[in-house]
Amino acid sequence: VGLGAGRTVDRCIAIIAGRLAAGTLVDVVAMPTSDAVAARLRDLDVPQLPPDSDRPLDVAIAGCDSVDDKGRHVVKGGLGAMLREKLVRDAAA
């Protein structure tokens, strides 16, 4: 699973880690989109793929940095993980 940055994804990481620890989720390996996400995954003992892995991903989860007043447009890239998020997204395609 590819994992982006942000509060929403951080909540997903915590849920994934909890389920891995409980044994209710197995065979999950994460590909982080930033060093901060990689550190969080390490702290929670979630296995990771190396950044240069060419293994295809089943799914990628990413958030957005803001949404306009009408809820129609999102802004990405405010946390600086945009390139790695694109690489992970493409791996999950």
Image (cartoon, rainbow, N blue to C red):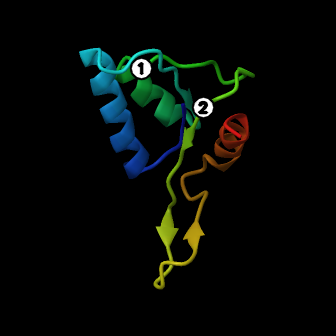
Residue 56 x, y percent position in the rendering = 70, 26
Say left or right for 29 vs 14: right
Which residue is pictured at 49% across the width and 45% down the height?
5
Residue lying at 29% horizontally and 14% vertically, measured from the top left: 23
Q: Where residue 46 sits: x, y (%)?
A: 41, 20
First in residue order: circle 1 vs circle 2: 1
Question: Given the image, on which type of amino acid does mark 1 rest?
Answer: Val
Q: Residue at x 44, y 49 (%)?
A: 6
Q: Is residue 7 shown left or right of residue 33?
A: left
Q: Nearer the viewer, residue 91 or 42?
A: 91
Crowding at dot 1, Cα within 10 Å, few <14 / some 14-19 / many 20+, comes out as many
Depth check, mark 1 against mark 2: the one in front is: 2
- In the rendered structure, find residue 58 and report the number of the disc placed on it: 2
Q: x and y percent of residue 81 in the render?
A: 61, 46
Label 2 sits on what residue type?
A: Asp
The residues bearing labels 1 and 2 have C-alpha atoms spaced at a distance of 16 Å
Q: Which residue is mark 1?
A: 46
Could you tell me residue 87's position as x and y percent?
Answer: 72, 39
